[in-house]
């Protein structure tokens, strides 16, 4: 296409008649570039060789498709590549192929999950998928949920709902409890909710990185003595650094006794709860009031894909409903924009729906089980005479050399990570309790035992 053709209005937007041939050509050309990038990733490595990507900002005149495709290719080849077998740093697995199509369909439809009339089929789809998750988790028929753009937003939706349900929206003594190993985004949630730092109370963890029940009870009793009013306790199902699981069964029973809202941050491990895999510590999840699940972190559902499931969907509706006076709504229909903080939302649920339908429960369990097997293989073959290991029952493991002080280990982790990247292995270096660790996440479906053996040779 020529530079003049960009000014042809028929090429700016899909047309309501005709073949839309221009769009088809562009989609095919884009697909070829992405597929070639995937195929080249083995020789390119997890991170780009050239990180000097330059972004060209808009000018007075629009650019031709040829110019834009040159810039698109530069953008793609300057990106992190999760498909490479050595991409083991974060909870960012390769994208599930069918999920990529879901993103394309969502973009093409451009439906808005704000209201049913703006997304009739997709609204039904989101409601049905959330209901399916509710059933798989063991919740009652009253349960349901809503999708959000990431785990932080899902957790924030849950906390706002819990505080509203407790009637503590404006109470300066309202507090909530998390473990000291919970995700750092809860500090962000605290600020957004207009709370002070001391309204977020952290409970000590045990030697396995799990919330300590004795400490939890002491903390709750102390809050009562000090006149603080607890609107939620957050249990973590899969901590960031070691994949630990808080004692959900005991915490849920305790919350029930004290009439406190229990939210489970299952951003990392919540997806395991819908399976029959024998994961130690995942029990009675359905006794919680709410749970966050992020299928993007291991199933390869393209970003973003996060769900908040609540035991009673009416509580979610009562928290966020405004009536949407500018939208025509049929009776007995729930506008999905009334169930969370976000109003306008893309049809992200499509890629999750396609991914789940494509995999089925057997496929889901295969993806999850394979990730744990890779972690176990790595853990069983890493030299334990040389390293201290920190892991839970999921697919995450962190480690440090034995006998080093903080300064020595901080220097070692920095240099080792740089050296591993040169060998096309990307693992992360999280700061945890004022010390740097090395962490490997084994959710990459392209990583085989031979790749892990190569990594082990570099470490052992």
Image (tube, helix red, strand yellow):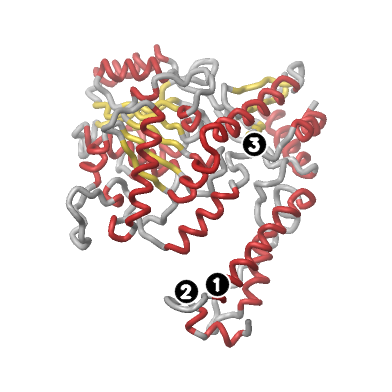
Residue beneath label 3, please?
429
Q: CA distance from mark 1 to mark 3?
A: 42 Å
Q: Position of residue 16 (x, y in %)?
A: 42, 76
Q: Observer-nearest residue: 133 or 199? A: 133
| Label number found at residue 23 | 1
Image check: 1 left or right of 7? right
- Please tell me how crowded label 2 is: few (under 14), some (14-19), or many (20+) other residues with Cα within 10 Å: some
Mark 1 or mark 2: name the one nearer the start of the chain.
Answer: 2
Q: Position of residue 391 (x, y in %)?
A: 60, 23
| Label number found at residue 14 | 2
- Evaluate if marks 3 and 2 touch, with contact meaning CB atoms under 8 Å apart: no
Q: CA distance from mark 1 to mark 2?
A: 7 Å
Q: Nearer the viewer, mark 1 or mark 3?
A: 1
Q: Observer-nearest residue: 343 or 227? A: 343
Q: Position of residue 3 (x, y in %)?
A: 61, 85
Residue that lies at the very extreme toward the front in this rendered image: 18
Above or below — where is 398 with respect to 13?
Answer: above
Disc tally is: 3
Q: Secondary structure at mark 2?
A: loop
Q: Observer-nearest residue: 99 or 52? A: 99
Image check: 262 left or right of 446? left
């Amino acid at each position: 296409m020529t530079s003049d053709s960009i000014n042809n209005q028929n090429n700016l937007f899909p047309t309501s008649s005709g073949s839309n041939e221009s769009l088809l050509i562009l989609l095919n050309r884009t697909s070829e570039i992405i597929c070639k990038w995937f195929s080249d990733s083995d020789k390119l490595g997890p991170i780009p060789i050239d990180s000097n990507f330059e972004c060209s900002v808009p000018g007075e005149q629009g650019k031709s498709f040829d110019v834009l495709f040159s810039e698109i290719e530069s953008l793609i080849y300057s990106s992190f590549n999760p498909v490479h077998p050595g991409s083991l740093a974060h909870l960012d697995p390769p994208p599930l192929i069918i999920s990529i199509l879901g993103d394309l369909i969502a973009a093409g439809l451009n439906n808005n999950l704000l209201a049913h009339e703006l997304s009739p089929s997709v609204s039904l789809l989101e409601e049905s998928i959330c209901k399916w998750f509710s059933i798989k988790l063991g919740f009652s028929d009253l349960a349901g949920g809503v999708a959000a753009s990431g785990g932080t937003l899902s957790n924030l939706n849950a906390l706002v709902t819990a505080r509203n349900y407790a009637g503590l929206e404006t109470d300066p003594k309202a507090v909530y409890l998390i473990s000291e190993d919970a995700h750092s985004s809860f500090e962000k949630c605290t600020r957004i909710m207009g709370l002070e730092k001391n309204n977020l109370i952290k409970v000590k963890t045990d030697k396995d990185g799990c919330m300590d029940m004795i400490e939890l009870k002491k903390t709750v009793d102390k809050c009562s003595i000090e006149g603080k009013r607890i609107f939620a306790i957050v249990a973590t199902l899969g901590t960031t650094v070691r994949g630990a699981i808080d004692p959900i069964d005991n915490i849920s029973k305790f919350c029930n006794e004290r009439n406190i809202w229990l939210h489970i941050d299952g951003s990392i491990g919540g997806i395991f709860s819908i399976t029959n895999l024998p994961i130690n510590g995942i029990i009675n999840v359905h006794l919680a009031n709410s749970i966050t699940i992020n299928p993007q972190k291991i199933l390869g559902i393209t970003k973003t894909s996060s769900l908040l499931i609540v035991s009673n969907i009416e509580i979610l509706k009562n928290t966020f409903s405004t009536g949407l006076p500018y939208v025509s709504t049929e009776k007995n229909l729930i506008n999905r924009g009334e169930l969370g903080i976000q109003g306008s939302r893309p049809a992200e649920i499509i890629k999750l729906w396609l991914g789940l339908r494509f995999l089925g429960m057997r496929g889901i369990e295969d993806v999850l089980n394979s990730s744990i097997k890779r972690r176990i293989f790595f853990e069983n073959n890493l030299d334990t005479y040389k390293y201290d290991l920190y892991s839970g029952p999921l697919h995450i493991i962190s480690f440090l050399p034995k006998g080093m002080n903080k300064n020595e280990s901080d220097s070692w982790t920095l240099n080792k990570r740089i050296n591993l990247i040169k060998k096309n292995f990307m693992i992360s270096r999280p700061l945890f309790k004022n010390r740097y660790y090395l962490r490997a996440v084994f959710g990459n479906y392209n990583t085989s035992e031979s790749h892990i053996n190569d990594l082990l040779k570099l470490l052992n």
